[in-house]
Image (tube, helix red, strand yellow):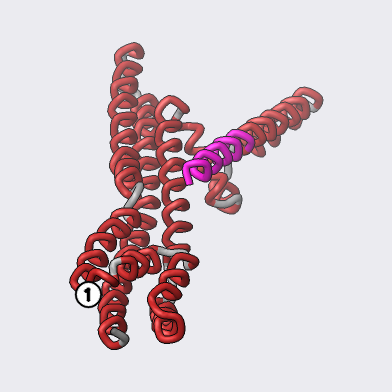
Amino acid sequence: MKKLIALLTVFGFLTIGIANTAFAQNQKKTDEAATEQVAETPEAAPAAQAELSVDPDEAVSQGLHYTLKEKFIQGGATFMTPVLICLILGLAFVIERIFYLNLASVNSQKLLQKVEDAIKTGGVEKAKELCRDTKGPLAAVFYQGLDRYDEGLDSVEKALVSYGGVQMAKLETNLTWINLFIALSPSLGFFGTVIGMVQAFDDIERAGDISPTIVAGGMKVALLTTVFGLISAMILQVFYNYILTKIDAIVNDMEDATISFMDILVKNK
């Protein structure tokens, strides 16, 4: 799983780097072509300048991806990059957990039926072999209980409870990292906003005048880090809640299945 996280992180960085490079190159080519056209036909300069101006309707039509990329560049790489890193690493842990939980989810009723049939036909050893060959935390818990079958049902129940706690802890692995990135993303955004506001006031001090252009431009750039930090935190929070819901469903299913498992052992004793 650690290799998977590393590969996903590297892939995310490469994808974003290639996209930003392509965007910068395309923008540069567009600007150069427009400049050459203005230089060749001076009489068409006003029309060319009008075409170079940003049309809000055109910007909206280019899609959310273009808008987010443009705002990310305006916010500056110093504080926007840490927020992006938090989002990438958080999503890497999210993907790892989702894969793990999907593999841990089994049809408990079907597994219980197989265990009961194995006990009836081949005894406890055949049921142990079945659980050993079956993937998932539930089969591992059943195996630990069957391994102590000769010591009595009380020992089986204690094994189910203790090893069930171990499996539940494994289900919650890496959730603390996701929670960290959820808290860290807006914090970095707020930090970038404070630094940006300080820089905006420095610009006002150097200009010697409270110009609306200076104030609005500095505040806009400063607040962009907070916007992207909140977006990153909200995305990770949605996946975090989904993972918690998935874990609760698996744990509840495991508890119900262990009760039915004890009933099977009592019935076939």
> Camera-side residue: 29 or 259?
259
Q: Is residue 139 left or right of residue 269?
A: right
Can you name the residue that lies furthest to the left here? Answer: 154
Give x and y (percent) for residue 92. 46, 46
Task: Check disc 1 and report its element: helix, strand or loop.
Answer: helix
- Rendered position, 100 above or below 248: above
Residue 190 is covered by the magenta coloring? no
Give x and y (percent) for residue 111. 43, 77
Give x and y (percent) for residue 73. 51, 32
Could you tell me which residue is drawn at 31 percent across and 84 percent down?
264
Is residue 102 visible from the viewing direction of this image? no
* Residue interval drawn in magenta: 1-18
Can you name the residue that lies furthest to the right here? Answer: 40
Is residue 47 visible from the viewing direction of this image? yes
Could you tell me which residue is drawn at 22 percent across and 73 percent down?
152
State the count of labels.
1
Q: Is residue 245 left or right of residue 126?
A: left
> Camera-side residue: 259 or 14?
259
Q: Is residue 108 left or right of residue 264?
A: right
Give x and y (percent) for residue 225. 38, 35
Residue picked out by circle 1 = 153
- Rendered position, 246 above or below 20: below
> Camera-side residue: 220 or 11?
11
Q: Amino acid at mark 1?
A: Leu
Could you tell me which residue is drawn at 26 percent across and 67 percent down?
160
Q: Is residue 14 left or right of residue 84?
A: right
Q: Toward which corner of the image does residue 17 lie, by quadrant?
A: top right
Q: Quadrant of the C terminus?
A: bottom left
10 Å crowding of disc 1: few (<14), some (14-19), many (20+): some
Residue 2 is covered by the magenta coloring? yes
- Rendered position, 124 above or below 141: below
Main SS class of the magenta portion in the image: helix
